[in-house]
C-alpha cells in the first residue's frame, strides 16, 4: 500500500528536553494508527510537526509525495491534513451550526468558489468541494454522523464536555481531510462511553475516506481500534507494529503500558 | 427616502447635526466590523483625518470641490494608507493592536501640526461644496450635503450589510473566538484582519471627507486621540447588532453632545460620560439591543 505520509528522521528539542529524536514513520493510506506513550513522550510534538505548528530541526515530512516540512498550518490543512485538539478549539460565541458554517465558508473560499467576498447565496448553491453538495446539506450530514444534530442551535461554549470534543472532530470533517490526526479523542469522556464514541468517530471519518492517526492513553481502546501502533518513549518510537505485538513488547510494557495501568489504578 | 424628504423641512442647524452624525457613523461602522473580529482601534481618527485632508487638499491645490469626488479621494487616501500600515498592524491583536493604531494616528497629528503648507495647528478652510459641477444656492448647500451624505451612507451600509454575509464576514467572529482554529481550518487570520482593517479605514476616510465638507474647516485635531475616543464611544453606545446601529448611535451621540454643550459649555464631557456609564451598566450590548429585544417581542406577540 502506498504511504500517504512519510516522516524521516525528525528531531526537535525544547531546551534540554528532546521531544523528537530521529522519529521516522511511514503511514499507509486507509489505515488507523494509534500513537501511545506517556505524557511528554513526544506524541503531540509529532502531530504538531506534521501539521506545521512546530518545525523540526532536522528531518523531512512528505505527504502524498510532496515535502510539507516548511509549510504553515493553513497550507497543510488545504492539502488535506486536518487535526482535532486535546482541548477542543471551538468558536465559543457561535452556535454549533455557525461553527460548521464558518468552516465550510473557509473551504469554499479556499476552493475559489467565489472567494471571501462571494455573496451570501454561495452557501445555498455552491457544492462544497469533496462532498459535491451545498453547505447546509454537508453540515447536516456531518452533524448527523457525529450525533450532534440536536445541538445545532446551542452555543459552543455551553456544550457538555463530550459534545465539545465531538464538535471539535466534526469541524475537521468539513475540509474532507485525507489524513486526520486526532489528539486524545476520548480524553475527558467517561470510561463506559469511550468505546461508543470512538466507534462513531472512526465510522464517520472512515466513511469519508480519511486515514487516521490518533493519540490514546487507554490501551483497550488502542487494541480494539488501531490497526497499527506507534509507541513513543523519550522522543523516540520504541515500537511500530500491530497492536497485539506492540503492546506485548517488553520495552513498551515497561515504559508505556505499565505506566498507563499504574496511572489508571 | 424619509430622511431625504424630511431633510427638506429640517432647520439648518439640525441638518448640520444629522450630516455630522452620518460622517461619524461611517467611522463607527468601520469600528463595528473591526470589533466583530475582536479588534479595537484607538486610532481610527487617523483615517478620518486623512479622508478630511485628502478632501481639503483637492480643493486647496486642484480647486475641486465636488462632494462625491471629495468622498472618493477620502476613501482612496485612507484605503491606501491602511493597506500599507495593515502589513504591520494585522500581526497584532488586543491591546497591542489598539495602542499601535493610537500611536499611528498621533504620528499623523504630529506631522500635520508641523506642516505649514497645510495650515499647521490652524488647519484650513474647505471650498464650498459643489454637486456634479453645479453649486447649490446658499440656502441649499446644507441640504445638498445632507442628501449626498444620506445616499452614500445608505450605499455603504448596504455594502457592509452584504459583507457580513460573505465567508469573510462570517470569519470575523471566528477570529475573535479562536484564531488557532481558524488557521487550522485553512484560513489566514492575518489576511482577513488586513482586509477588514482596510475596509474600516475606507469607511472612516469617507466619513472624514464628509465631515470636512460639512464643517467647512479642517485641523489636526481630527487625528487627535480624543477624536478616536469619540468614535469608540459611539460604537459602544450603538452596539454591534446591525449596520443601522452606528447611525442611530451617532445621531444620539450628536444630540447628547449638542444638548450637553448647550446646557453647560464647560462640563459637557461630564454629561457625556454619565450617559455612556448608564448605557454600559444597563445596556451592555449597546442601544441596538433595545431594538433587537423589541423585534423579538413583536415576533412573539404579533
Image (spheres, coloured by chain):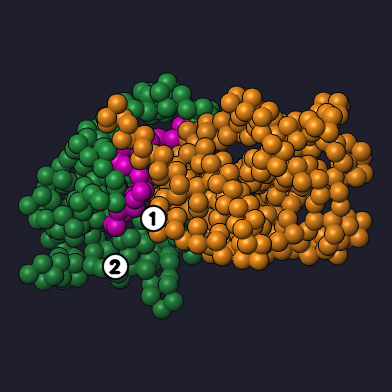
Chain colours: A green, B orange
Q: Residue at x 80, y 32 (%)?
A: B139
The residue most toward the front is: B263
The residue most toward the top is: A125
For residue A107, side relative to residue A168 (left or right)? right
Image vertical order of residue B140 relative to residue B38, above or below: above
Callout 2: SS: loop
- Res. B282 mark: 1
State the image quarter where residue A135 is shown. top left
The residue most toward the bottom is: A16
Residue B268 screen position, x and y as percent: 61, 62
Quarter that holds the C terminus of chain A: bottom left
Quarter that holds the N terminus of chain A: top left
Residue B262 screen position, x and y as percent: 65, 55
Callout 1: SS: helix
Q: Chain of mark 2?
A: A
Tell me how far mark 2 sits from mark 1, CA to CA. Answer: 52 Å
Q: Which span of residues is magenta-colored?
A: A81-108
For residue B88, side relative to residue A245 (left or right)? right
- Res. A41 mark: 2
Amino acid at each position: 500500500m502506498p504511504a500517504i505520509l512519510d516522516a524521516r528522521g525528525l528531531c526537535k528539542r525544547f531546551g534540554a528536553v528532546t521531544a523528537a529524536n530521529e522519529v521516522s514513520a511511514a503511514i499507509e493510506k486507509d489505515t488507523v494508527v494509534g500513537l501511545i506513550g506517556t505524557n511528554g513522550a513526544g506524541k503531540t510534538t509529532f502531530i504538531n510537526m506534521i501539521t506545521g505548528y512546530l518545525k523540526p530541526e532536522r528531518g523531512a515530512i512528505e505527504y502524498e509525495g510532496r515535502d510539507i516540512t516548511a509549510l504553515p498550518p493553513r497550507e497543510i490543512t488545504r492539502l488535506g491534513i486536518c487535526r482535532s485538539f486535546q482541548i477542543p478549539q471551538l468558536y465559543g460565541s457561535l452556535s454549533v451550526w455557525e461553527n460548521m458554517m464558518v468552516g465550510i465558508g473557509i473551504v469554499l473560499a479556499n476552493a475559489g468558489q467565489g472567494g471571501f467576498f462571494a455573496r451570501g447565496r454561495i452557501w445555498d448553491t455552491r457544492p462544497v468541494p469533496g462532498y459535491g453538495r451545498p453547505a447546509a446539506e454537508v453540515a447536516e450530514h456531518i452533524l448527523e454522523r457525529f450525533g450532534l444534530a440536536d445541538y445545532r442551535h446551542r452555543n459552543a461554549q455551553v456544550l457538555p464536555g463530550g459534545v465539545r470534543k465531538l464538535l471539535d472532530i466534526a469541524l475537521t470533517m468539513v475540509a474532507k481531510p485525507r489524513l486526520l490526526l486526532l489528539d486524545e479523542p476520548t480524553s475527558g469522556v467517561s470510561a463506559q462511553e469511550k468505546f461508543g464514541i470512538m466507534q462513531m468517530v472512526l465510522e464517520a471519518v472512515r466513511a469519508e475516506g480519511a486515514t487516521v492517526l490518533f493519540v490514546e492513553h487507554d490501551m483497550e481502546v488502542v487494541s480494539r481500534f488501531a490497526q497499527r501502533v506507534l509507541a513513543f518513549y523519550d522522543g523516540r518510537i520504541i515500537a511500530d507494529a500491530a497492536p497485539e505485538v506492540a503492546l506485548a513488547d517488553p520495552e513498551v510494557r515497561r515504559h508505556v503500558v505499565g505506566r498507563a495501568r499504574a496511572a489508571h489504578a | 427616502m424619509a430622511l431625504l424628504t424630511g431633510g427638506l423641512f429640517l432647520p439648518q442647524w439640525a441638518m448640520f447635526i444629522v450630516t455630522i452624525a452620518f460622517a461619524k457613523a461611517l467611522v463607527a461602522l468601520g469600528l463595528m466590523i473591526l470589533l466583530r473580529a475582536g479588534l479595537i482601534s484607538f486610532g481610527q481618527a487617523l483615517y478620518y483625518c486623512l479622508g478630511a485632508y485628502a478632501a481639503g487638499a483637492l480643493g486647496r491645490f486642484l480647486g475641486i470641490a465636488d462632494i462625491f469626488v471629495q468622498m472618493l479621494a477620502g476613501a482612496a487616501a485612507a484605503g491606501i494608507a491602511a493597506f500599507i500600515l495593515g502589513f504591520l498592524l494585522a500581526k497584532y491583536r488586543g491591546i497591542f493592536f489598539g495602542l499601535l493604531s493610537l500611536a499611528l494616528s498621533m504620528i499623523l497629528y504630529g506631522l500635520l501640526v508641523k506642516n505649514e503648507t497645510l495650515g499647521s495647528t490652524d488647519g484650513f478652510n474647505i471650498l464650498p461644496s459643489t454637486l456634479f459641477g453645479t453649486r447649490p444656492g446658499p440656502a441649499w448647500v446644507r441640504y445638498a450635503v445632507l442628501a449626498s451624505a444620506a445616499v452614500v451612507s445608505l450605499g455603504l451600509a448596504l455594502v457592509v450589510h452584504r459583507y457580513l454575509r460573505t465567508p469573510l464576514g462570517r470569519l470575523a467572529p471566528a477570529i475573535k473566538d479562536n484564531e488557532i482554529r481558524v488557521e487550522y481550518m485553512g484560513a489566514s487570520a492575518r489576511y482577513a484582519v488586513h482586509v477588514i482593517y482596510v475596509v474600516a479605514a475606507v469607511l472612516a476616510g469617507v466619513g472624514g471627507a464628509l465631515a470636512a465638507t460639512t464643517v467647512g474647516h479642517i485641523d489636526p485635531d481630527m487625528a487627535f486621540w480624543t477624536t478616536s475616543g469619540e468614535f469608540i464611544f459611539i460604537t459602544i453606545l450603538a452596539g454591534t447588532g446591525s449596520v443601522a446601529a452606528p447611525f442611530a448611535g451617532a445621531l444620539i451621540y450628536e444630540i447628547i453632545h449638542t444638548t450637553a454643550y448647550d446646557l453647560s459649555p464647560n462640563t459637557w464631557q461630564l454629561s457625556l460620560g454619565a450617559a455612556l456609564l448608564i448605557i454600559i451598566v444597563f445596556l451592555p450590548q449597546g442601544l441596538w439591543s433595545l431594538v433587537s429585544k423589541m423585534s423579538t417581542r413583536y415576533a412573539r406577540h404579533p
